[in-house]
Image (spheres, rainbow, N blue to C red):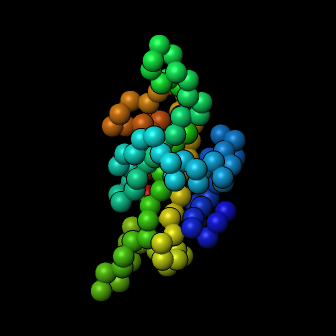
């Protein structure tokens, strides 16, 4: 993947599980259809439909691809270690840390698009 992105092991395993390529993840980040605040502190979740169709003048789709990412965290003067800046020294300026990626069947509800399975796995990581 380009030097713009840092993939966590969780993201890599989810990409393999859901059959998502690095190019698809980058495309979702560059052109999201929807953007929400992630459940993990200082994260953003973005979505792009897999295949859009126009039915009766409305755009519809049956599946979504979601990506949760975090941009580089600015370190404080004290440089205290915390879970939030654990990977900060691995990231280059302007680099995004891809935390997770998943496919959502159907149209996800606004406000909480993250499936329960992903939330449990992320909670275990934190």
User: With 120 as the anchor, is 65 left or right in this view?
Assistant: right
Q: Which image quarter is the N terminus in?
A: bottom right
Could you tell me residue 61's position as x and y percent? 53, 25
Please name whichever residue, 58 or 28, is drawn nearer the observer in this view of the structure: 58
User: With 82 as the anchor, is 121 left or right in this view?
Assistant: right
Q: Is residue 50 above or below residue 66?
A: above
Could you tell me residue 125's position as x and y percent? 49, 56
User: With 89 as the anchor, is 12 left or right in this view?
Assistant: right
- Image quadrant in which you'd find residue 62: top right
Q: Residue at x 59, y 61 (%)?
A: 7
Q: Residue at x 48, y 77 (%)?
A: 93
Q: Is residue 107 above or below residue 119?
A: above
Q: Is residue 86 above or below residue 56?
A: below
Q: Is residue 96 visible?
A: yes
Could you tell me residue 31's position as x and y percent? 50, 48
Please name whichever residue, 59 or 89, is drawn nearer the observer in this view of the structure: 59
Q: Is residue 62 above or below residue 101?
A: above
Q: Which image quarter is the C terminus in?
A: bottom left
Could you tell me residue 43's position as x and y percent? 40, 56
> How many labels, in total?
0
Q: Residue at x 65, y 40 (%)?
A: 18
- Which residue is outermost to the top? 56
């Amino acid at each position: 993947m380009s030097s713009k992105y840092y993939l966590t092991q969780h993201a890599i395993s989810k990409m393999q599980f859901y059959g998502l390529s690095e190019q698809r993840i980058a495309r979702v980040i560059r052109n999201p259809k929807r953007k929400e605040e992630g459940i993990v502190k200082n994260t953003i979740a973005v979505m792009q439909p897999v295949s859009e169709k126009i039915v009766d003048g409305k755009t519809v789709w049956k599946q979504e691809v979601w990506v949760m990412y975090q941009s580089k965290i600015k370190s404080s003067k004290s440089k205290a270690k915390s879970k939030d800046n654990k990977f900060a020294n691995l990231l280059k300026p302007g680099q995004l840390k891809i935390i997770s990626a998943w496919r959502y069947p159907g149209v996800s509800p606004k406000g909480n698009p993250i499936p329960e399975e992903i939330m449990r796995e992320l909670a275990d990581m934190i």
